[in-house]
Image (cartoon, rainbow, N blue to C red):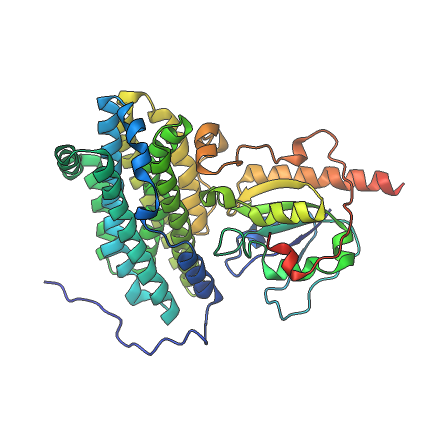
Amino acid sequence: MENLTLASHVDAINWNRVVDPIDDEVWDRLTGNFWLPEKVPLSNDIPSWATLTDDEKTLTMRVFTGLTLLDTIQGTVGAISLIPDAVTPHEEAVLTNIAFMESVHAKSYSSIFSTLCSTKEIDEAFRWSRENTYLQAKADIILSYYRGDDPLKRKVASTLLESFLFYSGFYLPMYWSAHAKLTNTADLIRLIIRDEAVHGYYIGYKYQKGLESQSEERKQELKDYTMNLMFELYENEVSYTHDIYDSVGLAEDCKMFLHYNANKALMNLGYEAMFPKEVTKVNPAILAALSPGSDENHDFFSGSGSSYVIGKAENTEDDDWDF
Amino acid sequence: MLLVYYSSSSEFTHRFVGKLRHPARRIPLLTKQETLRVDEPFVLMTPTYGAGRNQGAVPKQVIKFLNIEENRRHLIGVIGAGNTNFGEDYCRAAKKVAVKCQVPLMYRVELLGTQEDVDTVNLGLDKLCASSLKTAM
């Protein structure tokens, strides 16, 4: 058996001496976002679940077991594997929070299943998750980098999981929500999506911090590694997407969402977007399900004229901004 | 057109602003530092903060800057930086500033922004410059 790698030395953590303000900020954000699946009234989705066809039910359960697998990996291996590489004690603490929330996410899919499905159906979906080639491939690719000995490569793998690999799965509850189906389930998924954004941002930020002290050669090596890993995962994601969504004709629509999120994953790592705008045109209904109002046109600049009127300058105090 | 922006040490907004061909001034990172004073029309760009749903969305450093009446008087619009993953909270800070100061929310950018975002904002700020010149004449 390989030796277990733990942090070699631990000092009592002093939150009154924070080295990196981002640690403090992200801790507050994560704890402020804390939730449990029991708070979401999933049982209100029972009538809606009954309106789905058998194929749609099977698809939905498979997608959720796929997401469960990723959350399990991230909770029990991924976030934990980053702890020995942490550069501040507060980073270690944030990573334990991330690991725990991933376990909450993994459990929340089981809450959805126990509310909507039979034991037999649940067991069948989990069996599928163990046997699906593409799902297992994505788990294997990520796990191989978590087991590797390069701390920065681990962060890249982790960020791509948090900010890219989940989205072939997240697409479906957003699609159902856009069609007024399984809306409570979608509320729960949106809580997960919000958490993953903070995780991807944070781990990507720590990667960029780690890059600063590296040589130009090493920076280039890591950039090439990131792009290669993204392509490897992307090819597998495309196969996975066709495998699960072809039967309902949603694969192409889902791929737009994948490209859009792949770009965001790269940006979390500090790299420029890779996919051009032609292939990142996310269905507005999906975008609106993800972020209400995000489909509204706030592009003031493309309006005719773009002239402006200076607003009235009222007095403002600090308290005025918390509304 | 002058752009005034706040960016945390993660530098996302800073990097986006760096890709624009318009002058920019950065609001100091720490609240205890002296804030900027601006005496010409400008567009503000800000990310969204906060743990809670309704509290603390606008970064404290931005509030300190906007609490100066002269600065607010020259504000003509806001650009938000954010991530749609935050759902209803996407660019909440920019929306709050727009409502409070009665100026338009002009555009929203995710993370580092795409090339399309850079082009759109550059052109938009060009148009605002032209319109500002006309007003002056």
Q: Is residue A308 above or below residue A85?
A: above
In-front residue for pair A295/A168:
A295
Q: Position of residue A256 (x, y in %)?
A: 41, 30
User: Which image quarter holds the N terminus of chain A?
Assistant: bottom left
Q: Nearer the viewer, residue B76 or B19?
A: B76
Asked if residue B21 shows in the view, the reply is: no
Between A33 and A266, the one lying in front of the other is A33
Considering every residue shown, the one lying at the far right of the view is B137
Q: Kindly indicate the quadrant of the structure image that contains residue A321.
A: bottom right
Q: Residue at x 35, y 33 (%)?
A: A173
x, y percent for residue A220: 40, 53
Q: Residue B97 or A201: which is nearer the viewer?
A: B97
Q: Residue furthest bottom?
A: A11
Question: Residue B125 lies in what quarter of the image?
Answer: top right
Image spot of residue A62 (x, y percent) = 22, 33
Question: Along the horizontal axis of the image, is A234 left or right of A311?
Answer: left
* Residue A159 position in % (x across, y down): 36, 50
Q: Is residue B52 visible?
A: yes
Q: Is residue A178 above or below residue A3?
A: above
Q: Is residue A51 above or below residue A204?
A: above
The residue located at (44%, 43%) in the rendering is B85
